Amino acid sequence: MTSPEGDAPTRGRVVRTILESGPSTAASLAEELELTPAAVRRHLDHLAEEGIVEARDQRVYGSRGRGRPAKVFSLTASGRDGLDHQYDTLAVEALRFLSENGGEEAVVAFARRRADFIAEDFAVIAEAQPELTPAEVLAEVLTRGGYAAAVRTLPMGDQLCQQHCPVSHVAAEFPQLCEAETEAIGEVLGRHVQRLATIAHGDGVCTTSIPNTPKISNQTHRYDNREESP
């Protein structure tokens, strides 16, 4: 199936919207992009043919009406590959070198240092936007860091959903990056949070469960006491 070259910018907008919003129907994409559903379906057909998006039946909770469920479109692994992974090879090689010469502790120290942006940016955004809940502040922090994050409120607490991970290929080999991020998320929220899924392990979305009940701990905050690296 061929497509005019002028369609490329619009297809890029479709991909970016799915990245930021998660799996989406053609109707919701049309509304978001102010296009006709027919135009969006045409772009989705091209993207599916190129292996950038894939379709599946939309999950329906509760009773379902007549007719077939709507299709939702999500990015494939190869679709994500074309976004922000141009430095993956260099990063993996650097971490391999660090692991070989400094061992596991060196990799963990690097991962924690990288995750420091979560605590630093959390304080800034929380002060600038006091109307946001702590989970919403965290989602804003991660979105600014390239993770396309959003919060879903559930009866038992919140779920933090990251539609994109700029380091997923590196984290697939070095899960310490994911572990450090999860640790930092728990620290800034004062919760024992749990990662339910990660893009690095092949899931479509990084999902973190944030319970309603704060953790009770007499331990001193890690960010207040970590020794500075030379």
Image (tube, rainbow, N blue to C red):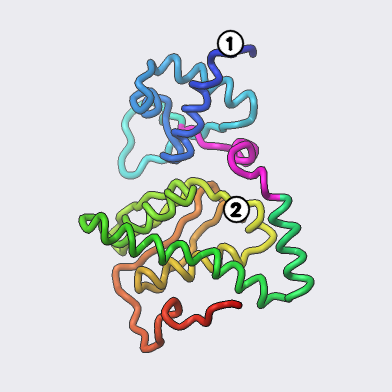
What residue type is disc 1 on?
Pro
Residue beneath the point at 65% across and 38% down: 78
Figure quadrant of residue 17: top left
SS type, badge 2: loop
Give the residue displayed 64% in from the left and 30% down from the top. Answer: 51
Position of 67 relative to 121 (above/below): above
Q: Quick check: 199 above or below 121?
A: above
Residue 61 falls left or right of residue 171: left
Relative image position of residue 75 (x, y in whole percent): 55, 37
Residue 160 pos. (x, y %): 40, 56
Residue annotated with mark 1: 4
Question: In the picture, which quadrant includes the N terminus?
Answer: top right
Q: Quadrant of the C terminus?
A: bottom right
What's the magenta region? Answer: 72-88
SS state under label 1: loop
Q: Residue furthest left?
A: 131
Percent position (x, y) of residue 82? 63, 36
Picture residue at 35% right of the left edge, 52% below the top? 151
Q: Please give the name of the residue rendered at 22% of the width and 58% of the height, measured from the top-left corner.
A: 130
Residues packed near mark 2 inside 10 Å, few (<14), some (14 to 19) or many (20 plus): many
Amino acid under disc 2: Val
Residue under label 2, please give it.
Answer: 167
Outermost residue on the front side: it is: 230
Front one among 39 and 170: 170
Dot placed on the residue nearer the N-terminal end, 2 or 1: 1
